[in-house]
Every structure is written in C-alpha cells, then in structure tokens.
Image: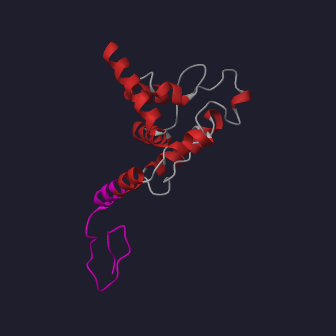
Amino acid sequence: MISSSPLPLHPYRCTRPPFGFRGARALLVTVCVIATACTPDAGETAATTGSITPAVASLTPALDGRALYETNCSACHGAGGLGDGPMAETLPVKPANIIEHLGDHAPEEIVRRVAEGIPPAMPAAPLSAEEITEVLDYIWSTLPDSTQSRLRALQLLMMEEH
C-alpha cells in the first residue's frame, strides 16, 4: 500500500496520523517549554560553560537552529557566539559577539543584517529569513533567563527610541 503520509504506517491501521506535522511540532514545542520551565537552572548552563549547548537541545525545535548555527556561523563566531571561532584569528575584522548584539537591534534588523551581510566583516549568510530566525531562536534558547530578560528589555528600549 502506498501512502502519502510522511510516517510509515502499519497496513492494518489508519492510513493517516492522528495529527499533521504542525500538530506534532506544536506538541513538541509545548512539551519542551514545560520541560525547560520545570528544569531548575537549565538556562544557566550556557553562562557557566561559555558554549551554546542548551540543556534540552535534543528535545527542542531549536535543534534545527543549532545545526544551522554550527554549519554557518560557529567557524567565525565560535561555539558560544563570542566571536572566537577557529577562523576568527585569520579574518581581517574580528567577528562580532552575537550575544551583545541581541539587545542592540530589533529581531527584524538582526535578520536583515545577517541576510545581507555586514561588509567588510561578514558576508551575507546563505540562509533564508526563516532559517536565520531559527538560528536566533536557538541562540536565545541557550541564554540564562536573567540574560534573556536583560537583553529583551534593552531591545524594547532600543525599539522605543527608533
């Protein structure tokens, strides 16, 4: 039996999954949010280790963002987004500390800058706006709650001024 469903199905069972991909993703997001909220100090690990490795990375949708970050960004910006990647020393301009920039720009501005590049320092990223947003969501997910709150407040202040 040939099925258009992305999931392999047993021939004697229903030919459609009980909910589509969006429903499964929404369920996964909900479970991850609850798991993260119930894990004490889960966000604090990034600050203490200096790397972008969330405690629940294997469970979150940010996993796509993590893979995109590791493939497209970490060589220059480093594992922790501090601008200390393995290629950083060979570049004419030191890569930016991504974490510092999160509070300085509106999310749309960061997406635009990454997509277009920042000459001469950074070339345009070979990512769609959606993929860049996934990378940014991943980076945010690695920050301790206190850092997220501080940077979000700075973002709001900056957006009110402009």
Where 61 falls versus 95 (above or below)?
Answer: below
Q: Residue at x 55, y 45 (%)?
A: 45
* Magenta stretch encompasses residue 34: no
Q: How is the image coloured?
A: secondary structure
- 100 sits left or right of 155 in the view: right
Most extreme residue toward the right is: 90
Q: Is residue 71 left or right of residue 106?
A: right
Residue 31: x %, y % from top left: 35, 58
Task: Say above or below: 142 vs 154.
Answer: below
Q: Residue 100 location, x and y as percent?
A: 52, 26
The number of numbered discs placed on residues in the rendered structure image is: 0
Q: Which residue lies furthest to the front in this view?
A: 40
- Seen as rendered, the residue at the extreme bottom is 12
- The spot of residue 69 in percent (x, y) is 54, 42
Is-magenta flag for residue 26? yes
* Res 4 → quadrant: bottom left
What's the residue at 38%, 50% (across, down)? 37
**Residue displayed at 49% across by 29% down:** 114
Quadrant of the image for the C terminus?
top left
The answer, for residue 154, to whether it is visible in the render is: yes
Task: Identify the image quadrant of the N terminus.
Answer: bottom left
Q: Which residue is drawn at 38% across and 74% down?
A: 8
Whether residue 116 is visible, yes or no, is: no
Range of the magenta residues? 1-30
- The picture places residue 25, in percent across and down from the top left corner, at 34, 56
Predominant SS of the magenta segment: loop
Image height of 8 relative to 108, above or below: below
Q: Which of 3 and 114 is in front in this view?
A: 114
